[in-house]
Image (spheres, rainbow, N blue to C red):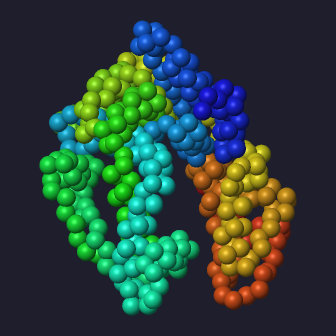
């Protein structure tokens, strides 16, 4: 998808309110990747991504901007917390694990795409397999019907979902269960280590026809896909399109004067540095270079500052953007102008129990006011505050809904909001006087 920076920002605006500076920075970084791809191989090697560091309180959209950006262009994306990594020699996560996780994500992305390409063929073979199984099962119902017509009728019924809940005994692949070889590390299956060296085992399982069809389709799709080509493409995508979002970077900033054998924050920074600078990491799919991956670091930076990071790491994040705390107007926009907003989510959830939920404009304004004030008087958790407020607000409606009742309209206005949020607004008023 060759979107211009303005188009990228417009797409991000559908899901994230405000934070224009951060959106511009990521949009330019993404467009630069497209520009780099159009250059000659010699020039391409010289141009590395300009990594970004985001400063701002929790819940203002740092992670969401990066996640939506990756989703927009179907780029491999992972989010990691800097605090889970430790220095070499200490028990904890190895920093190279973030690159391996990214390659795993790229592999799944490519495999899903290839499966979609062969889905028609795979489904066709799986249906033939299932019809044979059903024909054997229903042979007493056949009577004088010719075999071809009987099987055609079974296929038609299978496609209509007539047999979806029918339990059958199916012969399926016996997949070895993933094992955690190292505590805290990703689970690994024996098949992923030894590949084709292990013999293929099958076993009989009692499944519904619908479940068996899903397994048969996946099995047939695997046969049609060239796994080596998937691995090569996954490595290429991870190297050139991968985005690694390192959260809580401020928690490893600053130097400690602790004595004795302890994990130092600076040590973790020095371990992360070669990954961000550009190095080669071995993964189960092959070697991958990190030189052209885009790194986005983020943190609240309440206590530590960006300047407290080691100079070498600072130099690898040339673009720094600050995200602002959300205002009442931002909250109103989040509740009304975003795709799948919270108000829409609650409306469709309660519609299942015949509740027609409607919010008046003054109710939205009251919710936004209360959310902003609680963020100001207690911990600022950004847009996450809306989840708390909405749960309190709709607790009674959610609890009383359910059962065979006719459709009921529930209108939420300012009076309703103030009455139902009296408890948390009272607590909020008291907090103003607590030093």
Quarter-of-image position of residue 292: top left
Which x, y percent locates residue 21?
A: 65, 28
User: Which residue is the extreme one toward the top?
Assistant: 42
Is residue 143 depicted above or below 434 in this figure? below
Is residue 33 depicted above or below 208 in this figure? above
Which one is nearer the viewer's eye here, 359 or 310? 359
Is residue 5 depicted above or below 356 in this figure? above
Horizontal arrangement in the rendering, residue 344 relative to residue 323 (left or right)? right
Residue at the spot 77% in from the left edge and 67% down from the top edge: 417
Horizontal arrangement in the rendering, residue 372 relative to residue 259 (left or right)? right
Q: How many numbered dots are placed on residues in this image? A: 0
Which x, y percent locates residue 48?
A: 45, 17
Quarter-of-image position of residue 101: top left
Residue at the spot 25% in from the left edge and 74% down from the top edge: 204
Q: Quadrant of the N terminus?
A: top right
Residue at the spot 37% in from the left edge and 64% down from the top edge: 216
Residue at the spot 41% in from the left edge and 67% down from the top edge: 128
Which one is nearer the viewer's eye here, 312 or 215? 215
The reply to whether residue 317 is in sight is yes
Which x, y percent locates residue 272?
A: 33, 29
Which one is nearer the viewer's eye here, 410 or 83? 410
The reply to whether residue 253 is in sight is no
Which one is nearer the viewer's eye here, 382 or 104? 104
Quarter-of-image position of residue 44: top left
């Amino acid at each position: 998808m060759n979107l211009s920076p303005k188009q990228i920002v417009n797409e991000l605006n559908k899901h994230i309110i405000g934070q224009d500076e951060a959106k511009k920075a990521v949009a330019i970084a993404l467009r630069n990747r497209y520009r780099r791809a159009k250059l000659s191989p010699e020039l391409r090697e010289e141009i590395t991504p300009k990594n970004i560091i985001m400063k701002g309180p929790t819940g203002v959209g740092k992670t969401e901007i990066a996640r939506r950006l990756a989703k927009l262009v179907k780029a491999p994306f992972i989010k990691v917390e800097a605090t889970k990594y430790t220095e070499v020699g200490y028990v904890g996560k190895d920093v190279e694990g973030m690159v391996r996780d990214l390659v795993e994500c790229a592999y799944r992305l490519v495999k899903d795409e290839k499966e979609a390409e062969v889905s028609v063929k795979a489904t066709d073979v799986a249906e033939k397999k299932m019809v044979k199984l059903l024909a054997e099962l229903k042979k007493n119902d056949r009577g004088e019907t010719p075999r071809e017509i009987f099987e055609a009728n079974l296929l038609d019924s299978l496609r209509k979902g007539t047999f979806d809940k029918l339990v059958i005994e199916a012969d399926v692949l016996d997949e070895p269960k993933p094992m955690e070889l190292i505590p805290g590390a990703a689970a690994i299956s024996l098949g992923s280590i030894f590949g084709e060296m292990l013999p293929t085992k099958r076993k009989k399982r009692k499944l519904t026809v619908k479940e068996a069809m899903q397994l048969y389709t996946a099995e047939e799709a695997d046969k049609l896909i060239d796994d080596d080509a998937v691995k090569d493409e996954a490595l290429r995508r991870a190297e050139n399109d991968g985005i690694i979002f390192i959260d809580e970077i401020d928690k490893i900033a600053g130097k400690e004067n602790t004595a004795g054998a302890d994990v130092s924050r600076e040590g973790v920074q020095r371990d992360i540095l070669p990954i961000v600078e550009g190095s080669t990491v071995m993964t189960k799919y092959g070697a991958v270079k990190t030189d052209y991956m885009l790194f986005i670091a983020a943190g609240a930076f309440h206590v530590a500052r960006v300047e407290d990071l080691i100079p070498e790491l600072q130099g690898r994040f040339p673009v720094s953007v600050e995200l602002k705390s959300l205002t009442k107007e931002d909250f109103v926009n989040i509740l009304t102008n975003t795709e799948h907003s919270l108000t829409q989510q609650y409306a469709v959830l309660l519609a299942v129990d015949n509740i027609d939920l409607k919010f008046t404009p003054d109710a939205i304004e009251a919710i936004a006011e209360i959310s902003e004030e609680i963020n100001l008087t207690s911990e600022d958790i950004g847009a996450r505050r809306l989840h708390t407020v909405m749960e309190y607000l709709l607790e009674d409606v959610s609890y009383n809904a359910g059962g065979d009742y006719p459709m009921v309209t529930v209108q939420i206005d300012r009076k309703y909001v103030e009455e139902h949020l009296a408890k948390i607004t009272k607590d909020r008023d008291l907090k103003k006087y607590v030093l």
